[in-house]
Amino acid sequence: MSGTAVDVLLPAATPLAVGPLLAALAAHAVPGLEEVDPAAGSVRRTVPGAHGPAAVSLRITPTAVRAEIELAHPGDGDAVVARLRRWFDLDTDVAAVDVHLAKDAALAPLVAARPGLRVLGHVDGFEAAVTTVLGQQVSLAAARTFAARLVAALGGPVPGTATSGGGGLRTFPSPEVLADAGPSALREVTGVTGNRARTLHALATVCAAGLRIDPDQDPGATRAALLAVPGVGPWTAEYLALRAMGDRDALPSGDLVLRRALGGASAAETVAAARAWRPWRAYAVTHLWTAAAYLARTP
């Protein structure tokens, strides 16, 4: 890649279930940080790069993702594209996953209805961790509101975006910014409880000190580091393993939506039911979340 503005076509292993992917993106979209238009199949936001954020404008189709990217530096192109491919899980042989999961009677109709369903990842592990902490024990709508307040108060402006049209959006604050802000300021700008603000600050502090939450790290070690943060429990760590670490066998067994989708199962019963899904439990979870929450909220 050369130059600052690039236009890239990212082919996907087919099939690619576009509707559910866009529904999941819309369900998690933080106002002011990203824009998702399910009807148009479009997404706008920034993606971290080594030399600064890249503004991206995406169009998702059944065979590929078309990306218009405004890079901070031409050398960032390959890494930004790699983040985009991981975000949308474009390289997995989902046909083989579907065959495996369809053997389970509870999942078979979901797989038949949505072949090619992807596990939605994330472009930035720290952002995923902060928004997940903000979502502890509250609704998804409340979590998005808290995150939007954080972005408005402490996020940065999107660089010039002649190609991708990032006007009106902001970048997510870095670990250093949140660590420097302190728990009192984080509580004030977001409206979360004091305990939650302290967890955010502790998380930002360890990430500023070097903790990385991404697929390039050992997932077991990253889980352990997260669980050492006061206020981060097993659900948060396992959810981040699924969304940010790329663990395709991750199972947030305590997740309320997942347990309800299984008929009110306990966490232990969820683990037992999920044995048949291995090594693709994250895909099974995504199927259940999609049916119970993401598509259920689509107008």
Image: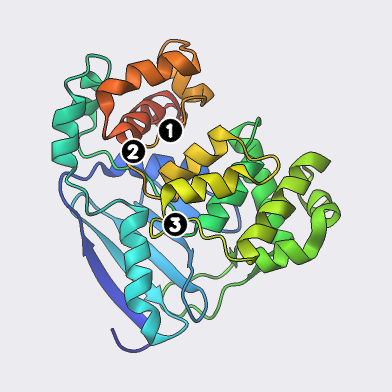
Image x and y of residue 215, in percent: 39, 56
- Locate residue 142, reporting x and y percent: 66, 37
The residue that disc 2 covers is 20
Q: What amino acid does circle 3 point to?
A: Asp
| Callout 2 crowding tier (Cα within 10 Å): few <14, some 14–19, many ≥20 | many
Q: Is label 2 in a helix, a strand or a loop?
A: helix
> Circle 3 sits on which residue?
214
In the drawing, does residue 163 fall left or right of residue 202? left
Q: Mark 3 touching mark 2, by CB under 8 A?
A: no
Q: Please tell me whether mark 1 sits on a helix, a strand or a loop.
A: helix
Q: Residues within 10 Å of mark 1 (few under 14, many from 20)?
A: many
> How far is disc 1 from disc 3 in space, using C-alphas?
24 Å
Q: Is residue 219 left or right of residue 229?
A: left
Is residue 30 visible to us here?
Answer: no
281 vs 16, nearest the viewer: 281
Q: Which quadrant: the C terminus?
A: top left
x%, y% of residue 141?
61, 37
Assess whether mark 1 and mark 2 are in contact (beta carbons under 8 angstroms): yes
How far apart are labels 2 and 1 at the CA level? 7 Å
The image's colouring method is rainbow
Residue 177 is marked as: none
Give the residue type at disc 2.
Pro
Q: CA distance from mark 3 to mark 2?
A: 23 Å
* Quadrant location of the N terminus in the rendered image: bottom left
- Compare marks 3 and 2 and give the one earlier in the sequence: 2
Q: Is residue 178 above or below residue 20?
A: below
- Where is residue 274? Give x, y as percent: 33, 22
Q: Residues within 10 Å of mark 3 (few under 14, many from 20)?
A: many
Rendered image quadrant of residue 2: bottom left
Q: Which mark is residue 294?
A: 1
Total marks drawn?
Answer: 3
